[in-house]
Image (tube, rainbow, N blue to C red):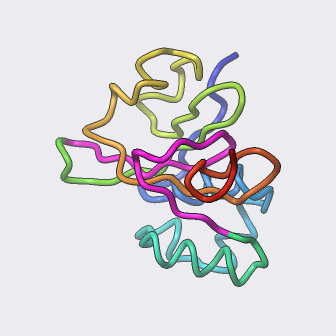
Amino acid sequence: MQNHLEQRTEWDCGVIAFSRLTGLPYEEIVQDVPKAAVVGMTVDEWIGYLSRKGFQVVRCNPTDRWAPPCAHLVAIAGGLRYHWIYQDQHGIHDPSHGLKYVHPQDPRLLNFEFYSGRILTVLVPSSGNLPHDLGNP
C-alpha cells in the first residue's frame, strides 16, 4: 500500500489530515476556512472548527495511548516547523512531498523517526480509539 495523500499547498497538511479523520471533503474545509490551505491553522483553531462542524474532538499528549484513526502534529526541520500527519489502521500517511511515497507501515513513520518529535494527537472519537486515561480500558 502506498501513501496516497499529497499536499496541494505548502500549508494544507492539516486540511488533508482532518479531511481523512472526519470524512469532510477537502474542498468543504477550504471553503469553510480558506486560511487552512494558505497559511495553516493553530491546534485550537482546528479543534474549534471541528467542534463547530459537530465533531467531538479529543486532544492527547504524546505519552497517551490511542488507537487510530487520528491526526498527529509533529515537529519538522529540527523543531522549527510543525506538520500534520494522519494515522489509520494501515499506518501513518504523510502528505508532504518528501514522504508521500513512503509506505504507511514503514517503521520509520510508525516510530516517528522522520520527525523532530510528536507534539500531540487529535482524535475524533469512534469505537475504541480513546486514550486509556480518558476512560477507555
Quadrant in which the C terminus appears? top right
What residue lies at 53% left-to-right and 58% top-to-bottom?
A: 14
What residue lies at 49% left-to-right and 48% top-to-bottom?
A: 72
- Left or right: residue 71 versus residue 74 is right
- Left or right: residue 130 versus residue 97 is right
Q: Work out whether residue 25 or residue 137 is closer to the camera in this orientation and state it.
A: 137
The image shows residue 71 at horizontal and vertical percentages of 57, 50
* Occupied quadrant, residue 89: top right
The image shows residue 108 at horizontal and vertical percentages of 41, 19
Q: Work out whether residue 100 or residue 129 is closer to the camera in this orientation and state it.
A: 129
What residue lies at 42% left-to-right and 72% top-to-bottom?
A: 42
Q: Work out whether residue 31 or residue 123 is closer to the camera in this orientation and state it.
A: 123
Quadrant in which the N terminus appears? top right
Which residues are the magenta region? 57-77
What residue lies at 58% left-to-right and 81% top-to-bottom?
A: 48
* Occupied quadrant, residue 34: bottom right
**Residue 69 included in the magenta stretch of the image:** yes
**Residue 51 included in the magenta stretch of the image:** no
Q: Is residue 31 above or below residue 37?
A: below
